[in-house]
Amino acid sequence: MLDLPRERWTFTHALRRQAAARGDETYCAFDDGRSLSYKTLDEQSNRLAAGLASLGIGPHDRVALIAPNSEEFLLTMHGVHKRRAVLVPISTELRGDFLTHQLSNCEPALVVVHADHLSTIAACWPSALTGGRTVVIGAGERPAYRDFSELLSAASVGDEAVLVPEGRDVALILYTSGTTGRSKGVVMPHAHCFLFGALFARALWLDANDRFLVTMPMFHVNALLMSLGACLISGMRAEVVKRFSASRWLADVRRSGATATNALGVMPEFILGQPPAPDDATHSLRRMMAVPISKQWGAAFEARFGVQLIQVYGMTECNIVSIGDRADPLQPGCAGPIVADHFDVAIRDPSSWERLPSGAIGEIVVRPHDPSCFMQGYFRMEAESAAAWRDGWFRTGDAGWMDERGRLHFVDRIRDTVRRRGENISSFEVEQVLNAHPDVAESAVVGVKVADAGDEDEVKAVLVAARVGVTPEELVEWCRPRMPRHAVPRFIEFVSALEKTPTGKVRKQALREAGVNAATWDREAVERARRPVDKGKP
């Protein structure tokens, strides 16, 4: 569909085109047994647009949505877009100040919320539940609230109710995970959202004959734009589950008949950690996008499950800017050639801003060919928006390098790169070594400041143990032959669980702020205590 004029790069145009071409073919099937055809989604979202119009929702109004993966989620997105309004999907996992921040930042004209989350909204944003500003999915015996089904009951849909957006119009405000501070609302035009789906379809070479398994939450760019967007643009069927489960993943693949899927962060490692079975490769799955991929498990995953792993590089803010070449053998960290028909990518020194040559590690920076295919800033965060750009280049905050073939290699988040003994250490690489230990369930590595390290960092590993009694000394001895000496963690701390964002990213800022405390084991302190004391000669 990239052959459409740029102003028609919207999911509204894509849906209308597929509804006309495919009609009653299933677009989305959910694990609760419900489904939506292309035609039904188009017609019902027209009705929802009329219902939203009756509530006064029009162009540029913001509609917050808090709901699980469901028909209602998709209907709301397409209905909101058909009013040229802006959808603000919000994580169903948010509570307290995290939720209050996002709602107060976007100030929605309307909140669409699943009944299961009403009490959460009431605790954080009670004004949303007054004055007719709330629509409840499954209101049931709650007469004080307008039920979602009422918005779909319009007897007729007039031409004035459905407003068709253009590619440059704002479609979404999607909040970042907020792993290092307040989450930021990424302002995303329709063309930006559309291109996510088109490039993801290109990355996994998808077409109407494929079937895609969606396991990520629909409030995230991965499921909403990449997975479901690619399905809509390609005319294929999406099989959607409410939530990811490593123990159920293979059963979901088999039940759905999926030929392609994706995973993010630690999801592939959790899948690989399930007990192996002789028929693990007996299924229809052929391709899977996974980022980041480690040498510790990438090849093992492909061999065990009989799938090809594909890597890409992208961000909510800047789209998919590089795609792995399917003809290349798996090379962990290699995100492939740049999507040169839409983006320029360079590697720069984050301090001097010098453009770095092939092989040198620096900050990945991106420049779009068309501004409508890129984020338009962070909503009501002018300082953060300005800081994200320099000389027309978007600063990703990621460390990477380009090889002589023009392929992009991802290393780590710059803030997750630990500087010790004059060397840069990738926290991701240290974590992969630790995670390979049979007695480690999960790990997170951060740099911490201590008085005896000067201006540099020391490496701290925060671990969830898989076996009671595993010691820091055992883990250090595991690390020594598997990584450079300067990367071996000095500090180790065991916790019962690592706090994560709803998309599975560890909240590392809290770990940095915790620093070295009473629960932290210090390798150097232990080694000093074991050294013999030289009492001098008599």
Image (tube, rainbow, N blue to C red):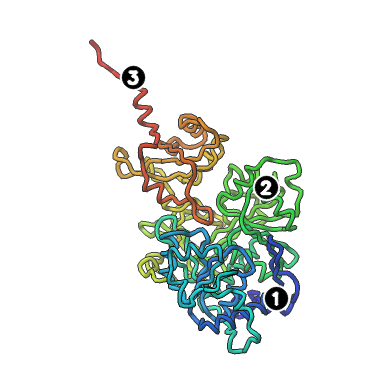
Q: Residue beneath label 1, please?
A: 40
* Quadrant of the snapshot with the N terminus: bottom right
Image quarter hosting the C terminus = top left
Q: Could you tell me residue 519's position as x and y percent?
A: 39, 37
Residues at marks 2 and 3, CA–CA distance in whole angstroms: 50 Å
Task: Report crowding for label 2: few under 14, some 14 to 19, many 20 or more residues within 10 A (C-alpha).
Answer: some
Amino acid type shown at disc 3: Pro
Which of the two labelled residues, at mark 3 and mark 1, occupies the earlier sequence position?
1
- Residue at (69% x, 56% y) in the render: 287
Element carrying mark 2: helix
* Corner quadrant of residue 151: bottom right
- Depth check, front residue: 406 or 517: 517
Disc 3 element = loop
- Disc 2 target residue: 302
Q: CA distance from mark 2 to mark 1?
A: 38 Å
The label nearer to you, 2 versus 1, is 1
Judged left or right of residue 481, residue 308 is right
Question: x%, y% of residue 150?
Answer: 60, 78
Residue 226 vertical placement versus 135 (above, below) = above
Rendered location of residue 104, percent (x, y): 41, 69
Residue 448 horizontal side relative to residue 113, left or right: left
Which residue bears the numbered disc 3? 532
- Element type at marker 1? helix
Q: Amino acid at mark 2?
A: Glu
Q: Which residue is drawn at the image coordinates 65% and 65% (left, top)?
A: 201
Residue 320 makes an appearance in the image: no
* Residue 494 is at least partly visible in this image: yes
Q: Is residue 52 above or below residue 180?
A: below
